[in-house]
Image (cartoon, rainbow, N blue to C red):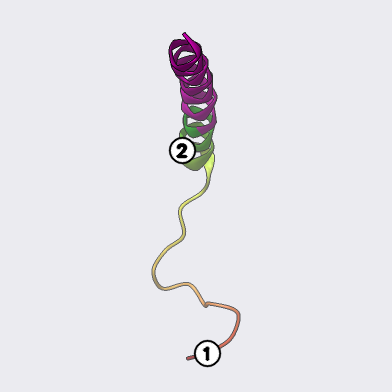
Amino acid sequence: MLEKELTERMDGIEAGSNKVFKVVFEKLDNLEEKLPSHGKDRQRIGLKD
């Protein structure tokens, strides 16, 4: 019986975390769509290779 209870708890945790990750990735996708695109000819800042 203990193994079945643990399996059910793990399934519940997995389902909950899947919902959270789905929301997070949807928010990131929406944010990415709103970001301005930069041209390839722009001057880069930072360290040079």
Does the magenta stretch mainly form a helix, a strand or a loop? Answer: helix
Identity of the residue furthest to the right in this view: 46
Q: Is residue 37 left or right of residue 46?
A: left
Look at label 2 and name its amino acid: Glu
Residue 16 in percent (x, y) is at 53, 18
- Label 2 neighbourhood size at 10 Å, few (<14), some (14-19), many (20+)? few
Look at label 1 and name its amino acid: Lys
Q: Is residue 24 left or right of residue 40?
A: right
Q: Which residue is mark 1?
A: 48
Residue 3 to residue 36: above or below: above
Residue displayed at 46% across by 59% down: 38
- Label 1 neighbourhood size at 10 Å, few (<14), some (14-19), many (20+)? few
Residue 4 painted magenta: yes
The local secondary structure at tag 2 comes to helix
Residue 42 to residue 33: above or below: below
Q: What span is colored magenta in the figure?
A: 1-24
Residue displayed at 50% across by 18% down: 6
* Count of residue discs: 2
Residue displayed at 53% across by 20% down: 13
Identity of the residue furthest to the front in this view: 1
Residue 4 in percent (x, y) is at 43, 11
The local secondary structure at tag 1 comes to loop
Separation (CA) of disc 2 from disc 1: 29 Å
Residue 40 in percent (x, y) is at 39, 69
Residue 19 in percent (x, y) is at 49, 20
Residue displayed at 58% across by 86% down: 47
Task: Specify the label residue 12 is tagged with.
Answer: none
Q: Which residue is mark 2?
A: 33
Of callouts 2 and 1, the N-terminal one: 2
Q: Are marks 2 and 1 in contact (CB under 8 Å)?
A: no
- Tell me the quarter of the picture where residue 11 sits: top left
